[in-house]
Image (tube, grey):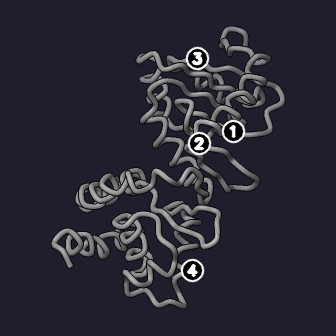
Amino acid sequence: MSPGEQSLEKADVPLQDVMGWGKNHAAAYRCLVDKGPLEAGEVVVRTSIPRGRIYDVLEDLVEEGAVTYRERNPRRYDAQNPEGLIQERKENFDDKASELIETLGNAYQLNLPDKSDDSAWVLGGRSGTVRKIRELLEEAEDSVRALEPDPRWCETSDHRVYEKLHRENVELKIVIWSARQDTLEEIASFNYPVWEYGDLNKMFYVIDGKHVVFQMGGDTGIVFSDATIANVFAREFEDVFKDAEEFDLNDA
């Protein structure tokens, strides 16, 4: 085992403490961060997780939003960005979180080129979908188009990200269901534009004309990183946007 692998393996115990996981869940997540997308059997080979437990462990991580998977046979699992995942619990474990972000984050970044062939991933749970949206918004450079029927997940930090993007001349077109008047009025206190639409029954984000986060039925989300697919969603967005009205607090 190389020194780098030994260092990552040491992250298993802090992961259990920080995330509230058992040793199998921590080992599976750390393995996926280190090695990139893997089939369940490949995770078994690289860890001490019993073969009879591996699918339960991986599906638990998917449900929690820590892991995503590609819909194909055989299924391959992929770790969510450890920085965003761990930051959510950082207030309770500052010292351990900083160490984990550095250790696992470096491995994640080194592994990014290996994921270029995979354009569609399933996001486990509402928290996984929101986490991916936040990650992509932080990296947005050109444009953000969004149909958002229920933006109540947005925190002040998210609004600050939108303000930053607006200052940097990133094209923002955020359409919110007009029934969310309280949320629209809250957003109006921040410095970025937002539009309202009366019959919004779907949620998706198109970022930089390449990435799409799409909410399916229930809490399941899918992320696409494909310009052709993004163009399809962008056209659907424009069909809605042309009939949306920019929200003005004075008219509320």
Residue 153 is labelled as 2
Residue at point 29%, 56% (across, down): 101
Task: Out of 241 and 248, give the one closest to the viewer.
Answer: 241
Which amino acid type is shown beneath numbered disc 2? Trp
Which amino acid type is shown beneath numbered disc 1? Asp
CA gap between label 4 and label 2 equals 30 Å
CA gap between label 4 and label 1 equals 32 Å
Task: Out of 186 and 126, give the one closest to the viewer.
Answer: 126
Nearer to us of marks 4 and 2 is: 4
CA gap between label 3 and label 1 equals 17 Å
Do tag 2 and tag 3 residues touch (Cβ < 8 Å)?
no
For the N terminus, give its image quadrant: bottom left
Residue under label 3: 193
Image location (x, y in percent) of residue 107: 29, 59
Residue at point 83%, 30% (across, down): 199
Which amino acid type is shown beneath numbered disc 4? Tyr
Residue under label 1: 150
The residue tagged with tag 3: helix, strand or loop? loop
Image location (x, y in percent) of residue 139: 42, 35
CA gap between label 2 and label 1 equals 8 Å
The residue tagged with tag 2: helix, strand or loop? helix
Between discs 2 and 3, the one toward the N terminus: 2
Task: Out of 219 and 235, give the one closest to the viewer.
Answer: 235
| Residue neighbourhood size for the residue with mark 2, other residues' Cα within 10 Å, grouped as few (<14), some (14–19), many (≥20) | few
Name the side, left or right, on which 22 lies relative to 198.
left
Residue under label 4: 55
